[in-house]
Image (tube, helix red, strand yellow):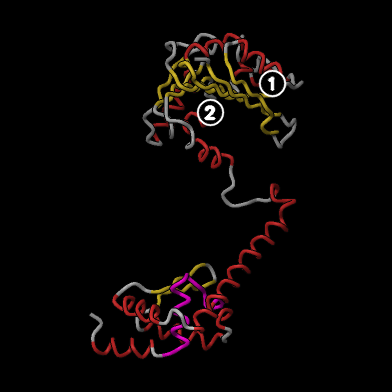
Amino acid sequence: MIGLTGTSRLLKALADDTRLRILHLLAQEELSGSDLMEVLNMGQSRVSTHLNLLKEVGLVNDRREGRRTLYSIAPGPAAALLQQVLLENSESPEFASDLAGLQVLREARAAQKRAYFDRVAASFGEQLLPGRTWEGLARGLARLCPRGRYADLGIGDGMLTLLLAETAEKVTAVDISPEMLAALRTRAKAQGIANIETVEGELENLPLPDASHDVVVMSQALHHAADPDKALSEAVRVLVPGGSLLVLDLLAHSEDWVREKLEHVHLGFTEADLAARIKAAGFTHVSVSRAARDPQPPHFMTLVASARRGR
């Protein structure tokens, strides 16, 4: 119930052409005071006076967004009466003119946004942009992965394992280092992740049953294998028919220091070499391409390879 006094004030608020035009525009979308000034071709003080009165009678809400105040139609008993009034005047020439002005405003906004991206297009990839992280992108893309049983072979810091666990039915994390596996278990527990099983083992002799996984991932692990071909054969063995393989590794390089400092056995692989090894292991639908170059020297290049176990 609005009450007699409230009803009287409400009817007085609606008994004004300009206020009805403002309400009609706000019924289309949320607008700022400056938006209304532009569409209605009115000064700030006049628009502000009308908006304040409409707020007082409960027809309009406002909210802050940065430096702007945005206005919208308030829900409540008065909204039903307003809807009826606007409907009865929907064919008025004033409303039609205001809608045309609102469309011009929308087009100007779109043009302004296009102009910004056109202006920064050449340097966009070099700018620091809020929220643009590789982890965020990978986490988002992982949600598109099929739910299933994943084997992460050679887990490293475990970041990829934890990411996969958000989508997978189960992740089997295999690594030669019990300390790496223990650290992963600690991080998984802290994040409330319970679908990771850790298994100590070598890439060339996986302690996993045949055809037990839907996807095998080897991220920067193959260059640590004494026998990469045997490691890939083991990946085939533990995959179900039609299962998928994902390999991330380094493009062939000449930085020999990684052998002693980082325990690399191989100095990366060429695209042709990696593709040939994967095919020889029994995979089909093999694809190998360059993915990204490290920004810091010596600018290692990462290869990404995907393949499927035949059915």
Label 2 element class: loop
Q: Position of residue 187 (x, y in %)?
A: 44, 32
- Residue 191 quadrant: top left
The boundaries of the magenta stretch are 16-35
- The extreme front residue here reads 91
Label 1 element class: helix
- Height in image: 29 above or below 292? below
Mark 1 highlights which residue? 258
Amino acid marked by disc 2:
Asp
Main secondary structure type of the part rendered in magenta: helix
Which of 101 and 153 lies nearest the eye of the viewer?
A: 101
Q: Position of residue 122 (x, y in %)?
A: 75, 51
Amino acid marked by disc 1:
Val
Q: Is residue 176 left or right of residue 271?
A: left
Mark 2 highlights which residue? 157
Which of 98 and 47 lies nearest the eye of the viewer?
A: 98
Question: Which of the two discs, 2 and 1, labels the residue nearer the N terminus?
Answer: 2
